Amino acid sequence: MVYLFIKHHAIDMNDNRTNDMIEQVISNTPLFLCNAHERLPSLDKMGGDWDLIMKLIETRKVFYSRLYKNRVTYLSNELYWCMKSYKQRWEKLSQTSQKVFGFLDGFGEATTPEIKNILLLSDKTFAKCINELTKELFITAVAKERQINNNWSSFYWGTYKLWEQTAKKCPSDSQDIYTILAPIFSEREIQQLLK
């Protein structure tokens, strides 16, 4: 099992060769985490930075989720379309999460403060809703709102429908989910992801 990781080095986002190399890595890595993990691919291990991940989010090359153990998990475009048939289960959402989805579905995209203020949500309730909605692939980060520091920014949130409007469509039956994830996870781990 071979992973294509880029060694740590400074990335010039205007360098087409670097962009091509990152695109190649992304195309060979169906799922990666935001933060370092001892075994799984991560943005850091791939040599990426926050500007890169925001570029990948905004160009719909990755889908921001909390699929893996409630950690920020980026899904490749291909994996998103395959995973979609296992997720987006309305019955898994609390009523408050359903309201958040309904608001975004009608509004388009919104920031965290906008969602919290309009729906009168506490920080704790909002965090719980975001976790439910991103784990079930109902909503995702669609754009950067405000840069907080070099490693984080606030987001505009949108529904999967909004994301799909500008994402490249991959046939969900093009590859089996187990085949896609086999280089990263055991069969049991894949079953856990699909729960």
Image: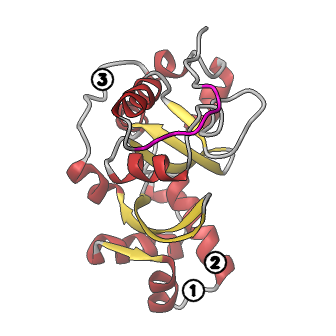
Determine which quarter of the picture holds residue 9: top right
Q: How far apart are marks 3 and 1 (CA)?
A: 39 Å
Q: Where is residue 8 in the image (x, y as percent from the top left)?
A: 65, 32
| Residue occupying the point 33% across, 47% down | 60
8 in relation to 87, above or below: above
Query: Does the residue at mark 2 contact the one at mark 1 (Cβ under 8 Å)?
Result: yes
Is residue 110 at all visible to an observer of this figure?
yes
Question: Does dot 1 land on a helix, a strand or a loop?
Answer: loop
Visible in this render: residue 86? no
Q: Where is residue 66 in the image (x, y as percent from the top left)?
A: 58, 50
Of the numbered discs 3 and 1, the one sitting upstream in the chain is 1
Q: Which of 147 and 117 is in front in this view?
A: 147
The residue that label 2 is drawn on is: 125
What is the three-letter code of the residue carrying label 3?
Asp
Instruction: Characterize the local packing of mark 1: few (<14), some (14-19) or many (20 or more) Cα atoms within 10 angstroms.
Output: some
| Sooner in the amino-acid sequence: mark 3 or mark 2 | 2
- Inspect the image, locate mark 2, and give the three-letter code of the amino acid beneath it: Thr
Instruction: Report the amino acid beneath label 1.
Output: Leu
The magenta stretch is: 7-13
Q: Mark 1 points at which residue?
A: 121
Q: Quadrant of the N terminus?
A: top right
How far from the left and from the top, in percent, is residue 162? 27, 59
**Dot 2: within a 10 Å radius of its alpha carbon, few (fewer than 14), some, or many (20 or more) residues?**
some
What is the number of the mark on residue 41?
none
Element at badge 2?
helix
Q: What element carries label 3?
A: loop
Kindly identify the residue that appears in the image at 63 percent across and 86 percent down: 122
Task: Identify which residue, 142 or 105, lies in the foreground.
Answer: 142
Q: Is the residue under label 1 in contact with that under label 3 (CB below 8 Å)?
A: no
Left or right of 1 in this view: 176: left
Residue to which mark 3 is pinned: 173
